[in-house]
Image (spheres, rainbow, N blue to C red):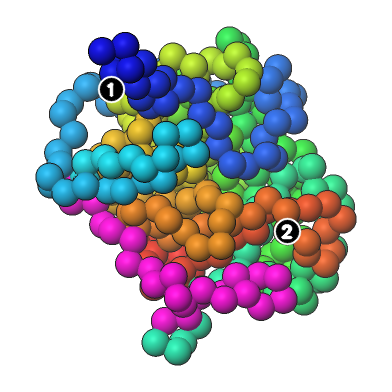
Amino acid sequence: MKRLLCLSLVLAVLFSAVLTGCNSNNTQNSSNGGSVSDNSGSASDSSSQTATDSPVQATGGKVHIQDSILGDIWITELEGVPHNQLDNSGFSTENGLKVYTENGNKASLAGIDVSYNCGDIDWKKVKDSGIDFVMVRLGGRGYGDEGSLYTDEKALEYINGAKQQGIKTGGYFFSQAITNDEAVEEAKYAVGILNGLKLDFPLAYDWEIIKDDNARTDGVSSAQATECAKAFCDEIKSQGFTPMIYSPSKELYFKYDLARLKDIDIWYCEYAEVPTFYYQFSMWQYSDKGKVDGINSEVDLNICFTNVAKYNFFY
């Protein structure tokens, strides 16, 4: 009985634990809110939905997960959520960048994501190294109770520099939203940073549970996390941009109700040779140790799949 009780407690801790995302670019200017722009605005008049703990619809099938602590885990498959159809034998590496081919044809683009931590970037060298797209951090919200919004000081410089070299550009916003109104506020703030600048790729919602630090998101329920993601993405779409959700697998499996978010593309994070996520995703961040000519620091490497995008934003 004691052994069963201990195992139950371990499982409870795993599924409710404070989990962190993969992207290391968000540590600076986050714990104290960073520098706050004057155009943050208010989302108090938003009509976003209230989170509810509705039952998750399931198929009865099982999804196998390999966890670093508990080993093999089986969870119930969600109904109506598209499956990952990628063939792992289609992955190869060329000049340090992953490539995906399908039926003998290339079906991917190579990319990076950057924040001001990357410093000055020579975008011509980046383009010549084989990079097709870049996801640029626009800003974020701080970990603290105040949750101040901040702008990445290099965001517009990076986007304009990449565009001049023909590199496709997207963006992401590091969220610490705990209500729907805050998520909408973040979306408006991110669009405000662009100030009319258009993106070729999506504007992604990067909401993370913070590990080994106190954060305002510590007590956010799964239902509320899901509604925050939806509120952000709905607002982004209403502003004329393509939304996307960035997340590692544990948040995708255990924090989000993917059935509520199934119409939104996923930017999946897993540092591995091949992806293992069960459900469909359009972009994969596979390393934070990339070396790309034109960037002096290590950089996150990404690949997007031109055969699974819902909005044809790769073309």
Viewer-proximal residue, 16 or 299? 16
The residue singled out by tag 2 in the image is: 290
Q: Residue, x 32% and y 67% (percent of image)?
A: 85
Viewer-proximal residue, 53 or 141? 53
Q: Quadrant of the N terminus?
A: top left
Is residue 53 left or right of 307 when viewed as pictured? left
Q: Position of residue 282 (x, y in %)?
A: 43, 60
Identity, as a three-letter code, of the amino acid under mark 2: Gly
Quadrant in the picture for residue 99: bottom right
Q: Position of residue 69 (x, y in %)?
A: 48, 33
The residue singled out by tag 1 in the image is: 51
Quadrant in the picture for residue 252: top left
> Distance of mark 2 from mark 1, alpha carbons?
38 Å
Viewer-proximal residue, 300 or 168? 300
Range of the magenta residues? 79-102
Q: Position of residue 100 (x, y in %)?
A: 50, 75
Asked whether disc 2 touches disc 1, contact meaning CB atoms under 8 Å apart, the reply is no
- Say whether residue 186 is visible: no
Say few, some or many: other residues with alpha carbon within 10 Å of mark 2 (under 14 / 14 to 19 / 20 or more).
Answer: some
Q: Residue, x 50% and y 23% (percent of image)?
A: 18
Say few, some or many: other residues with alpha carbon within 10 Å of mark 1 (under 14 / 14 to 19 / 20 or more).
Answer: some
Q: Position of residue 240 (x, y in %)?
A: 43, 51
Is residue 82 left or right of 118 when viewed as pictured? left
Identity, as a three-letter code, of the amino acid under mark 1: Ala
In the rendered image, residue 104 lying in the magenta stretch gets the answer no
